[in-house]
Amino acid sequence: MRAREVYKILQKDGWIYKRQKGSHITLFKKGFGNYIFSFNMNEDIKSKMISKIEKKTGTKIGN
């Protein structure tokens, strides 16, 4: 799955863009605090990393 797709899923789940420095995007969601999304948007994200993102953000990303 591409990083761009994961980013869009996080936004749909209520994560709000806060700031960016280079490829590090800081997202915010009330109740969770900040999450730093540090991927190139065209990069493929492997399933193990997707599961870590799901755990940290509380968002279901995979099938």
Image (cartoon, rainbow, N blue to C red):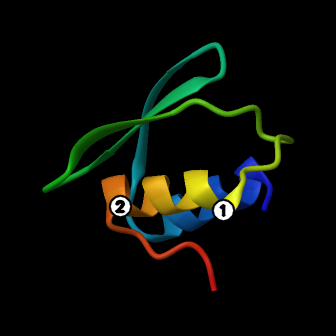
Q: Amino acid at mark 2?
A: Lys
Position of the N terminus by quadrant: bottom right
Which amino acid type is marked by label 1? Ser
Number of other residues with Cα within 10 Å of mark 1, as a class: few under 14, some 14 to 19, many 20 or more: few
> Can you give x and y, in whole percent of width and height, for residue 7 in the image?
61, 53
Quarter that holds the C terminus: bottom right
Would you name the residue on which mark 2 appears? Answer: 55
Disc 1, SS:
helix
Q: Is residue 53 above or below residue 27?
A: below
- What residue do we see at 13% from left, 56% from top? 31
User: In the rendered image of this protein, does residue 41 appear above or below residue 22?
Assistant: below
Left or right: residue 45 compared with residue 52: right
Which residue occupies the foreground of this view, 19 or 2?
2
Number of residues whose C-alpha sits closer than 10 Å to that of mark 2, classed few (under 14), some (14–19) or many (20 or more): few
Q: Residue at x 58, y 30 (%)?
A: 38
The reply, left or right, for residue 54 in relation to residue 33 is: right
User: Disc 2 versus disc 1: distance between alpha carbons?
Assistant: 12 Å
The answer to whether 62 appears left or right of 10 in the picture is: right
Q: Which residue is mark 1?
A: 47
Q: Residue at x 82, y 49 (%)?
A: 44
Q: Which mark is residue 31?
A: none
Vertical arrangement, residue 53 with respect to residue 35, above or below: below
Q: Nearer the viewer, residue 59 or 14?
A: 59
Along the polypeptide, which appears first: circle 2 or circle 1? 1
**Residue appearing at x 45%, y 54% in the figure:** 52
